Amino acid sequence: MNKDYYIGLMSGTSMDGVDAVLVDFNERQPKLVAKHSETIPKHTLNGLQRLCLPGNDEINLLGQLDRSVGQLFATAVNALLAKAAVEKEQVIAIGSHGQTVRHMPNLDMGFTLQIGDPNTIAVATGIDVIADFRRKDIALGGQGAPLVPAFHQEIFATTDTPKVILNIGGISNITYLPAVKDNQEVIGFDTGPGNTLIDAWCQQALQQPYDKDGTWAASGSTDEKLLKHLLSHSYFSQAFPKSTGRELFNQAWLEQQTAAFGYLNEADIQSTLLDVTCHSIAKDTLALSDSGELFVCGGGAFNGEMMRRLAKLLPRYTLSTTSKLGIDPQWVEGIAFAWLAMRFHTRQSGNLPAVTGASRKAVLGSLFPAA
């Protein structure tokens, strides 16, 4: 039986589920063979949200969630294979991003931490797992993020036309792909919050996990004073390489920043938070180029109000999603981590030092064999 496939596992900052994809890399354009999303159980989600903030009994909670998330990832893999009618023996390896619970690359001894025990995944699926992709880049002096620009370059870059790829998950990251003929370096970094603040406010105010299609935000009016206050955060003016996460843009930060704006309508706050995402993305996009083609992936691609506001802020850009480039926006990141597993297996580098700030290119990840 030939081994043809890789599996990518992705659980992002939004914590809205585990994406599992089965991918064939035998042609230049990756072939998405099958996909599956696994809901994160409520008790696991609550634990992860607690662990993302400093608290008590962190080591016990970390250890237990590491195993629980590993089992959840394995469940997603087994469901994916059953859906695709593919045997585990046909899979070369699983590339598991893990669930980030701390990302603090700018400390004196910077670190990043993803959980979802790869040994548990390997045992429960019978497939070799490649995981821990970010820490080699950190060890080389990099941010360990974002890693997807290397994949964007490999798959989306073309000879004559520059492109901007915008991934809007919990955090937004942007990749500028110059035309191959121009022989320029790829630029990529986290612009700031994507869905994380608008999801947090929606959960707090409406007890709903997200604002479907941005309808609630569209019903409100942005408060310019609050918008200016939120965008004054130093992260938005930092030079790249840079990356961020829930450690900075989280529920506690949001409550602190909005404390003096309690007189605002809740829908107006939601509209303002959506504009924080859109304005920070637009500012960084325009700093790279004042016009061009922008392709969106991640959950934000399905938020109609977000896409409309971005289009208004970027009038000289043509906005569409990565579907136009041949990959459904929901599955780009999952495919990217299958690709990183393939790069590890073939001993090829997975990072771009110009993006992360690492001192050199490196093969990313570690192998956790099933045997």
Image: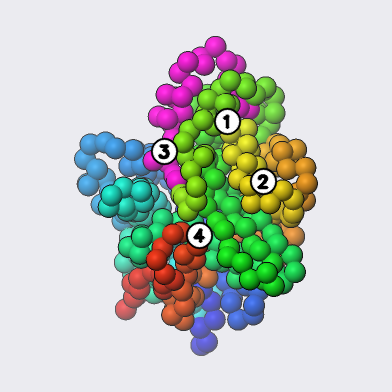
Which residue range is magenta in the image? 244-272
- Main secondary structure found in the magenta portion: helix
Name the N-terminal-most of marks 3 and 2: 3
**Front of the two marks 4 and 3:** 4
Q: Amino acid at mark 1?
A: Leu
Could you say whether the residue bearing mark 4 is in a helix, strand or loop?
A: helix
Q: Nearer the viewer, mark 1 or mark 4?
A: 4
Q: Which residue is mark 4?
A: 355
Front-lying residue, 175 or 76: 175
Q: Amino acid at mark 3?
A: Leu
Q: Is residue 155 above or below residue 280?
A: below
How crowded is the residue under tag 4: few (<14 C-alpha within 10 Å), some, or many (20+)? many
Circle nearer the N terminus (1, 2): 1
Tag 3 residue? 248
Discs 3/2, front: 2
Q: Splitting the image into 4 quarters, where does residue 42 fall?
A: top left
Does the stretch in magenta take in 230?
no
Q: Is residue 319 visible?
A: no
Q: Which mark is residue 286?
A: 2
